[in-house]
Amino acid sequence: MKRTKLTVTLTTSALLAAELACATDSAPPTSAQAGEIAVMSRSAVKERLAQIEPAEASDDVMGAMCYMTAFVVVPDQMEYVCPHCGEKTIHGKEVAVQWTEELESCRRLIREIPRSGMFTLDESSFCRRCVPRVGIPELVLVVHFDDHSTLRVAKINSSDLGLLKVFFSAKRTEEEESALHENIVRLRELLGDRK
C-alpha cells in the first residue's frame, strides 16, 4: 500500500514539475501580439470563412434514437442587474424561462472565444432603465474589427457563441469541423460576410 502511494506521489510531482517548467518557459505576449489576438480585419475573417465549405445534404442522416428528459425548475421571474448602469430589472416568467441560464452561458462563452477581445455582448435590452420600451429582450453581438468598425448582430444565443468559439479555436475535433460546415450560413451572418 505504501509503495502505491509513493509511486502516485512521485508521478504527480513529476507532472507538476513538467507543467511548471513549461509555464516558465513561455514568455507573455507582447502588446503587438495581444493586439493581433484581440481583433482581425474583415478580409482576414473572410479568408478564414472561405476555408469552410457548406456541408452537403445527405439522405441518410440519422438522429439520436433516445432522449432523456431533464427535470427543470421553471422560475417565475428573473432578476437582472445591468452591468452598465447597475439598475435592477425584474422580468416575468416568459423571459425567465428563456434567459435565466442562457444569459450566464452566453457570458461564459464570450469569454472563452479565443479572440474574445473582438466580441462584446450588448445586454441593454434587458435593462428597463437603458432601454425602457422592450417586449422580450435579446442579446446583441458586437463584432469589433481592426479598422475600428463594428458589426451588430441581433438575436444571439449560446449556440451562436459556441460556433464562434469553435471557429476561432486552434484545434478542432472532427465533430466540431462538421458543425462549422453545417452552420456556415449562420457563421457568415455572425461575422458580417453575407453572400
Image (cartoon, rainbow, N blue to C red):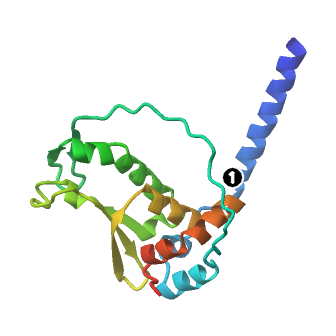
Q: Residue at x 58, y 85 (%)?
A: 47
Residue drawn where x is 78% and y is 33% of the image: 13
Image coords of residue 149 (percent x, y):
35, 83
Q: Which residue is mark 1?
A: 24
Q: Circle 1 — which element?
A: helix
Instruction: Please indicate, yes or no, whether residue 169 appears anywhere in the rendered image.
Output: no
Question: Which percent across, then down, holds residue 69?
Answer: 49, 35
User: Which corner quadrant holds the N terminus?
Assistant: top right
**Left or right for 100, reference 162:** left
Whole-percent x, y for residue 174 in the image: 71, 61
Going 78% across and 32% down the picture, which residue do you hit?
A: 12
Report how many numbered discs are placed on residues in the image: 1
- Residue 88 visible? The answer is yes
**Mark 1 is on which residue type?**
Thr
The one of 137 and 47 positioned closer to us in this rendering: 137
**Is residue 60 rendered to the left or right of residue 18?**
left
